[in-house]
Structure formats: C-alpha cells, structure tokens
Image (cartoon, grey):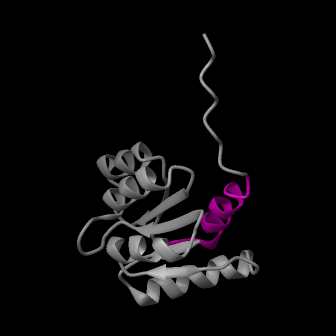
Amino acid sequence: MIIVDDSKLSRMHVRAMVLRNKPDWSVVEAANGDELFSTLRDTPVDVAIIDYNMPGDNGVDTAAKLRRSHPGIHIAIITANAQDAVVSGIRAVGAAFMPKPLEEAQVVRFLNSTALPPRRPSPAPQG
C-alpha cells in the first residue's frame, strides 16, 4: 500500500495506524502525486491513502489519474474539508472519504474493506 501526503508527520501517523492493524503489509510513502506515480513504476500497490491538500494536483485529481492507470486499486482520500463538492468529487473517483482528524477505527474499516479482491468487470455478453 502507499500513503501520499506532503506532510511527513501525517504519513508517519497513517503508517503507524496501518501497521498496527495490518503488520504484514508493505507500506511505501510519497509526498505528492508525482512521487506516487514515480514509485508505482517500481513498486506495485493495491491500496492508496491520499491526502486531499497537497502541492500540485490535489488528492481528487491524483486519485482520478491513479484510477485511470490502476483501475483495481482501493483508494481513500483524507481531508478536513468536508464540503459537499469535495466529498462528491471523492466519491466520483470511486474513493473512500476519511475526514480529519483521522480516527484509527475509520482507517481499520477502510483497510478491512480492501481485504476483498478487487472486483473485475463482468465480461460483455456474447451476442
């Protein structure tokens, strides 16, 4: 899994929550969207927790690009901005919304929801 946040302290906080609950998971970090995509060239991930407010692309824009390049990835976006437009944007890219301050129970629910294999699209009916 990957944690994307421009704050090193925030990344450490989320990493600690993840590893307390999924100690066997491999966790990598990125400071922004560019670093995320650079990391993905060498490191496959199936779960991403992305901060909304970052320099460059915000979390929703980053998640949209990630969804296009890695459609099966499980994504959550964390933000203190719970305005309807922001939450709608998060949902529109198929990501989970996790409000700040981040609670460990929320993180655990998200992590446990990712334990299911990603759904594959059903094959088109043969006509």
**Can residue 101 be seen?**
no
Image quadrant of residue 9?
bottom left
Image quadrant of residue 46?
bottom right
61 displayed left or right of 29: left
Residue at (46, 83) in percent of width and height:
10
Q: Where is residue 66 in the image (x, y as percent from the top left)?
A: 42, 58
Depth order, front residue of 92/104? 92
Up/down of 118 relative to 111, above or below? above
Pick out the residue farthest to the right: 24
Pick out the residue farthest to the front: 127
Predominant secondary structure in magenta? helix
Residue at (52, 66) in percent of width and height:
48
Residue at (35, 81) in percent of width and height:
6
Image quadrant of residue 120?
top right
Q: Position of residue 82 (x, y in %)?
A: 37, 56
Q: Position of residue 123 (x, y in %)?
A: 63, 28
What span is colored magenta in the figure?
A: 101-116
Pick out the residue farthest to the top: 127
Quarter of the image with the N terminus in it: bottom right
How many numbered marks are there?
A: 0
Depth order, front residue of 89/2? 2
Does the magenta run of residues contain 89?
A: no
5 displayed left or right of 55: right
**Can residue 107 be seen?**
yes
Does the magenta run of residues contain 111?
A: yes
Q: Where is residue 85 in the image (x, y as percent from the top left)?
A: 30, 47
Quarter of the image with the C terminus in it: top right
Residue at (66, 64) in percent of width and height:
111
